[in-house]
Image: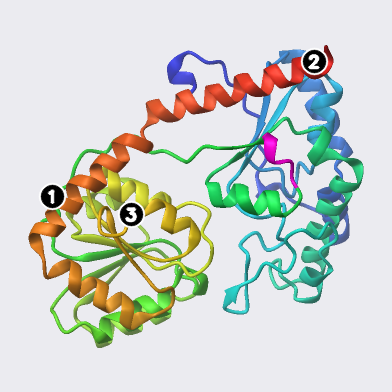
Amino acid sequence: MLRARGEEVLDHVLNNSEIKGNLVTIGLRSIWNTQEADRIKDLIRSTKPDLMKVDNFFPLFSPSIFEAAKSMGVPTALSVRNYRLICPSANLFRDGHVCTTCVGSKLALAAIQHRCRQQSYMQSAAVVASNAYAHLRGVWTNSVDRYIAVSSFVKQQLVAGGFPEERILVKPNFISDTGVGDGSGGFGLYVGRLTEEKGIHSLLSAWQHIPQAIPLKVIGDGPLESAVRSAAESDSRIEYLGRKSLTEVCEYLGKAAFLVFPSEWYEPFGRTIVEAYAKGTPVLAALTPPMNAMVDHGVTGLLYKPGDSKDLASAVSLLISDPQRLGRMRAQARERYLTLYTEDQNYQQLMAIFHQCIETHLAQLA
């Protein structure tokens, strides 16, 4: 998006497949990686950037890169699309329910106790130590000029976690316009990972309470794939399509009567919802705080009680029983996309954040 509008973007990318060595060494590097900090300094010397924007620093970069950039006189911005800064598991979800135990704690020992990161004491300890050491060194207050939160709810959680409110700006994700669909397929659609926190069990259970012959198509893969396959075998209305490309997903979204977004955790942002809106497809979503902000009940879709399969079934039946209302929702969903989630709007928002970041940095130097 930036390059297409004439901006110069220099990439510095690492892949987790590059992780080598024993777990102790990897864990220590995730806390404070001096090697990557030196690389950032070398890059800054050779390229002289106006700003460093970070999309993900864990585990290979570590928080050291922010301090490195600031020491070289370069302002920094960090995109926040999950909760790792305040929750070592990154999703505020544990043992089948929402968990905010560690929010506000600079040393999240509970996360180690519950093995919140990959069910591992060592990996959990590495995230906890990384966050704690960054707090101790003042990285989050002194070396990050702007946090770019993907939603207002993420910003609220960061503030509750002790991050400086005045430095946190909200910018949603966007998608390029894929064109309007017509909903001619008449089916409900789920797109996403097949995991517990995504509400797969309540989604499958809901179809047992729907008397109408409403098809459900499921796209995605994950640990609960066998549960989806089993449901498809026992109910001819349910079809498991496996993993699909983005182009294929958009085609299905355009033909779907509605998208089901049953996530029971505090999903930071519903990208699939935006993809549905672009097609003019209404959304049935579990009523969590982030989704309450994205789905306008009765306008762009319907909200139901999280984890309540009967309430979801009622919402499906209600939506399908009124074709005129469904048609109005399609138009309103498309309008919501055009109003909030286009590429042009996102470019303007992002550049405004960059300018704020640079101006704040210059003011600090004055």
What's drawn in magenta, residue-wise? 163-167
Mark 1 closeness class: few <14, some 14–19, many ≥20 residues within 10 Å: some
Q: Which amino acid does label 2 sit on?
A: Arg
Q: What residue type is labelled 3?
A: Asp
Label number found at residue 296: 3
Marks 3 and 1: which is nearer the front? 3
> Could you tell which of marks 3 and 2 lies nearer the N-terminus?
2
The residue depicted at 52 percent of the width and 15 percent of the height is: 7
C-alpha span from label 3 to label 2: 48 Å
Q: Which of the pair 364/25 is nearer the observer?
A: 364
In percent of width and height, residue 50 lies at 68, 16
Secondary structure beneath disc 2? helix
In percent of width and height, residue 289 lies at 49, 60
The residue depicted at 78 percent of the width and 52 percent of the height is: 20
In percent of width and height, residue 242 lies at 35, 65
Magenta stretch, main secondary structure class: helix
Q: Which residue lies furthest to the right in this view?
A: 136
**Residue 324 is inside the magenta segment:** no
Marks 1 and 2: which is nearer the front? 1
Q: Which of the pair 317/57 is nearer the observer?
A: 317
The residue carrying mark 2 is 45
> Could you tell which of marks 3 and 1 lies nearer the N-terminus?
1
The residue depicted at 18 percent of the width and 65 percent of the height is: 187
Q: Quadrant of the C terminus?
A: top right
The residue carrying mark 1 is 182
